[in-house]
Amino acid sequence: MPESWGEPEWLCASADLRECGDAVMFDVLENGLSVSAFAVRFRSVAVAYLNRCAHLPAQMDWQPGRFWDVEGRYIVCAMHGALYDPPDGRCVLGPCRGAHLTAITLTEKDGQVYWYPSQHLQPVF
């Protein structure tokens, strides 16, 4: 997990992240630039990543907030079909095989999901 550098930021209610459902989208500052990020739930665990393929710096959702392949097993990049393993963001098929999505640390507490800023990822104010 990435090292956290600040207080947790509220993201959404836990119920908003349905198993293999649409993502909760949010923006973060990466090194001072606003970028898109997303959170999804897979096997009961909430995970979040920057919405950027490890192969090309392009957003991955094929429609806003939709990242899953047809089986609901992998996060898929709509640009070229790369498949990412949800628990760790590792590319398992495609031109970036072995590379990872940029992870954002999440925690769930009292029915709420929070994300943690890091040295490179900060909240948009």
Image (cartoon, grey):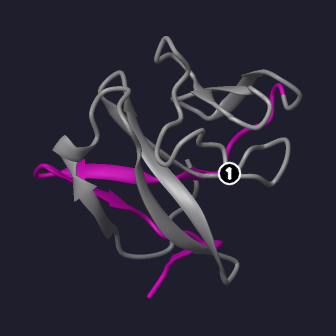
Q: Residue at x 69, y 30 (%)?
A: 90
Magenta span of residues: 97-125
76 vs 47, left or right, is: right
105 vs 22, left or right, is: right
Q: Residue at x 81, y 27 (%)?
A: 98
Q: Secondary structure at mark 1?
A: loop
Residue 48, horizontal then vertical, whole percent: 48, 47
Residue found at the far bottom of this picture: 125
Q: Nearer the viewer, residue 25 or 121?
A: 25
Quadrant in which residue 2 is drawn: bottom right
Quadrant in which residue 20 is drawn: top left
Residue 81, horizontal then vertical, whole percent: 74, 26
Q: Which residue in the structure is indicated by mark 1?
A: 59
Residue 60, horizontal then vertical, whole percent: 66, 43
Asked if residue 21 is positioned above or below residue 38 in the image, the reply reads: above
Q: Quadrant of the C terminus?
A: bottom left
Q: Residue at x 85, y 32 (%)?
A: 96
Asked if residue 52 is positioned above or below residue 123 in the image, the reply reads: above
Q: Residue at x 74, y 44 (%)?
A: 53
The reply to whether the magenta stretch includes residue 87 is: no
19 vs 59, left or right, is: left
* Amino acid type assigned to the residue bearing label 1 in the image: Gln
Residue found at the far top of this picture: 71
